[in-house]
Amino acid sequence: MEALAAVLHKYPELCLFLSIVLGHVIGHFHVKGVGFGNVVGTLLAGIVIGIFAKPELPELLRWCFFYLFLFSIGYSVGPQFFGSLKKTALPQIAVSLTVCVTGLATVIATAVLFKFDEGIAVGILSGGMTQSASLGTGLNAIAELPVSEEVKATLSAHAPLADAITYGFGDLGLILFLTWLGPLLMKADLRKEAKVMEAKLAGDRPSGERANPQFGFRAHRVEAAGAVGHSVAELEERFAEGRLSVQRLRRGERLLEAAPDLRLERGDLVVVIARRGLLLSTAEQLGPEVDDPELIAIPLKTVSVVITNKELIGRTLGELAADRAMARGVYLQSIHRGEEEIPREPWTVIERGDMVKMTGSPADVDRAAAICGFVERDLARTDLAFLAAGICLGVVFGMLKFNVGGAALGLGTSGSILVVGLLAGWARSRYPVFGAIPVAAQRLLMDIGLIVFIAVIGLHAGPHAVAAYQKSGGAYFASIFFAGAVVTVLPLAVGALVARKVFGMNPIMVMGAMAGAQTCTPGLNALREASGSNVGALAYTVPYAVSNIVLTIWGPVVVAVVHAIRN
C-alpha cells in the first residue's frame, strides 16, 4: 500500500483522472433515482485518494477549469436569463429570488448558531442548495481574505468537506419535497393538477404539433372526385389537421412544381407527406396508392434553429402550425429551452432563444428556418478565440475594486467571468454571427470544467478532512448535515408558500419552479415521473436561469458575511 501511495504521489495526474473515474462509478449508484451524482462522487473519490496519496497539484489548474465552467454556465443561460426579464415571468423570478434569499439567510443563521467558519458555511450553501458553482466562487473569495495562508488552507479544505456531507440530502430532500412533502402541504394531487394545467394552457387554441409527430410519405394516382380539379392549396387546407402537404406531382412524364394554385387532373401522380393517422384514409380522398420508389424518394433534412424572429415570440405552437406559409411540410421533433426539453403541445408558447429541431424536405425546412431564426451551419465549430477573450475580459473586470465605506468591493474574478459569459450568451442569441459555442461543446466545457475543479478540490481537501474529524469528532459532522438539511428544505417551503399564496400558481408549476430554483435536474425528472407530465418544465427554465446566477454569487457573499460576523 505504501508503494502504491508513493506512485500516486509521484504522478499527481494519475490521482486526478483516477478521482474522475472512481467518482463516476460512485455517481452511477442510485437507489430509487437518488444518488450522489458524478460531481459529488468525484469529490468523495478525490478526498479518499487525497488522504491516501497526498498529491501535489498546482492551484492554477483548478481555477483554469473552473473559469471554463463559469463562462459556459453564463453563456448557456444568458438568453433565458435576459429573456426572463419581462412582465409575464415576474412571478417565477420572484419565487426564485425568494428561494435564493431564504437560502442565504438560512446558511448565515446556521453558521452563527453552530459557530461554523467561512469554509463550512460555503460548503453548506453549495451542498444544501445543490449549486456546485457557489463552492468555487466561495473558495475564490476565501483566497482573498485578509488571513494567514494556513487559515486559508484550513477554510478551503472545510468547504468541500461540508459540501460532500450535505449534497446527498440536497438532492434527496428536494426530490422528497417535490414528490411528497410539497404536494402534502398544498393538499394537491400532482397528476390531477398536471391535467388541469394542460387543459388551462390549451384553452380554445387551435391544434398544433402533438407529442408524437410521426409522419410519412405516400404516392397516389389522382382519381377521387374530391381531388380532381382542386388546387394544391385547397387539398392541403382540407387536411390541415393532419398537416398534409403535396411534395411532388408528376403529370405524364413531366415533374411539375407543387405550387399552391396548381389544379390536380385525373391520372396525376402526387406524393404527399402527412401524419401517419391521416395517411390511413388518403387513398379514399385522393385515389389508389401507387408503388413508385423513384417518385417517392424525397430527401429529408433535419435542422436545429434558434428562435430569433420577434414575430414568432409569444405565439403558441398551435398558432404557428396554422400558419401554412411557414409550417407547410415541416414537422417538429423537439423544443429545448436552455438545457431542458419542453412540451410539444398546441399551447406551448415560443420564447426567444428556444432551440427548435424540425424535419421535412430541404426546401420546406430551409423556408421555415429562415422565418424562425438562425441555423448554425457548422454544428461542430467552436469559436475558441471568443471563449478565451470572454475569460480574459472576466479576469480584467475582476481586478476592478470600488471603495465603499473603506472596504474594497467588486465582483471578483469568478463573478466577472460569470457576468461576461451571461452577456456573451445573450449577444450570441441576438446577433448569431459570431461566438459560436454549440450546445454539445457547452456541455463538455461545463462537465469537464466542473469535474476537474472538483477533483482537484477533493485531492487537496483529503488530508485536512482527517485532521478536521480528529479535532471535532462525529458530532460536528452531524451538525453540518443537520444544517444542510435545513438549508435544503426551509427555502423550498418558503418559496412554495409564496408561489401558491401570493402568486396563485398551480401546484405542478410551483413544484417545477422549486426544482429550477435549486438548479436540480434530477428533481425535475422526479417531478415528471410523479405527475406523469412534462408541463412542470415550463416553470423550471426561468427559475433555473435566475438561480444559477444568484446562487453562484452567494458564495462570496456568504464568505464576506460570515467572516464579518466571526471577526
Image (spheres, helix red, strand yellow):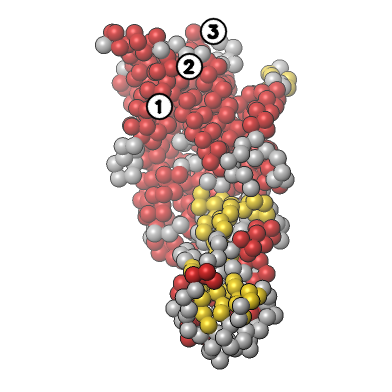
Query: Between disc 2 and disc 3, whose residue precedes?
Result: 3
Element at badge 2?
helix
Vertically, is 5 above or below 269? above
Residue corresponding to mark 3? 148
Query: Could you say whether the residue bearing mark 1 is in a helix, strand or loop?
Result: helix
Give the farthest residue toward the bottom.
Answer: 225
**In the rendering, which numbered label is found on residue 20?**
1
Seen at 51% across and 76% down, the residue is 219
The image's mark for residue 155 is: 2
Q: Where on the picture, by quarter, is residue 390? A: top right
Q: Amino acid at mark 1?
A: Ile
- Residue shown at 61%/78% (left/top)? 253
Q: Nearer the viewer, residue 508 or 527?
A: 527
The spot of residue 314 in percent (x, y) is: 65, 60
**Number of other residues with Cα within 10 Å of mark 2, as a class: few under 14, some 14 to 19, many 20 or more:** many
Residue 138 location, x and y as percent?
A: 54, 24
Which residue is nearer to you in this view: 426 or 560? Answer: 426
Query: Relative to the observer, which residue lies in front, 355 or 36?
Result: 355
Left or right, residue 397 beside residue 335: right
In percent of width and height, residue 345 lies at 52, 64
Image height of 85 relative to 364, above or below: above
Q: Amino acid at mark 2?
A: Leu
